[in-house]
Amino acid sequence: DQQVKQNSPSLSVQEGRISILNCDYTNSMFDYFLWYKKYPAEGPTFLISISSIKDKNEDGRFTVFLNKSAKHLSLHIVPSQPGDSAVYFCAASLGDSSYKLIFGSGTRLLVRP
Amino acid sequence: KAGVTQTPRYLIKTRGQQVTLSCSPISGHRSVSWYQQTPGQGLQFLFEYFSETQRNKGNFPGRFSGRQFSNSRSEMNVSTLELGDSALYLCASSSLNRGIVDGYTFGSGTRLTVV
């Protein structure tokens, strides 16, 4: 049972345009959501997180939106840069009693120059 | 400051053997988690340790085990290796008792190939 799903395995956008990466989840008890970026041969790098009590969190070019009623979150990258090309994972946490992250399968983003 | 260090980076083992992977967290980080990444599966949680105690465990068979030492360094062991254990094993550390808010810092991983 996959509780966190990233249904798009890949995404290609033009440099300077917006990249939108999507993530759906099934467990309404998740209370934190995170996005990680992963380059080949490196570990994932934390990008941005959002608490379930918020619907938006912004950090520079990265904004995460959370729609709890739809159990959906998205990561917006504006403007997209070639260096953003990587695999992006969304992850969810069940909160204080759980110290594990449940990851989606990832979306490979390619930003074309 | 030094990041999360995992050794070795690459490993080839034969079916039926056992393997031990090592993780040195960022200095001062007391929480260490382990994840398995296989193609198309994302990252699957193995276990998490804090102050030498396992606080949470994922849905992996008993062949997968781990421990944490008093200096916060952690090891994971896989016994009776199977071909399906071939994966990238990632270690992550956190400074907070509950590290979710700031996210964990991951190491570069150990690529295990079972032949």
Image (tube, coloured by chain):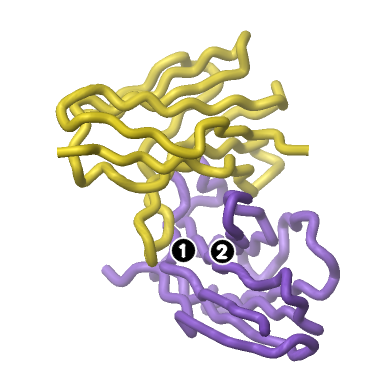
Chain colours: A yellow, B purple
- Judge whether residue B50 can be spotted in this image: yes
Report the chain holding disc 1.
Answer: B
The local secondary structure at tag 2 comes to: strand
Q: Are marks 2 and 1 in contact (CB under 8 Å)?
A: yes
- Judge whether residue B69 can be spotted in this image: no
| Nearer to us in this view, A26 or A15 | A15
Q: Amino acid at mark 1?
A: His
Residue B108 picture location, percent across and down: 42, 68
Q: Is residue B12 left or right of residue A39?
A: right
Q: Which residue is mark 2?
A: B32
The local secondary structure at tag 1 comes to: loop
Q: What residue is rendered at 54% in x and 73% in y?
A: B72
Q: Tag on residue B29?
A: 1
Q: Amino acid at mark 2?
A: Val
| Location of residue A109 with respect to A99 vertically, above or below | above
| Nearer to us in this view, B83 or B78 | B83
| Location of residue B59 with respect to A76 vertically, above or below | below
**Label tally:** 2
Q: What residue is rendered at 21% in x and 31% in y?
A: A80
Q: Nearer the viewer, mark 2 or mark 1?
A: 2
The answer to which quarter of the image holds residue B67 is bottom right
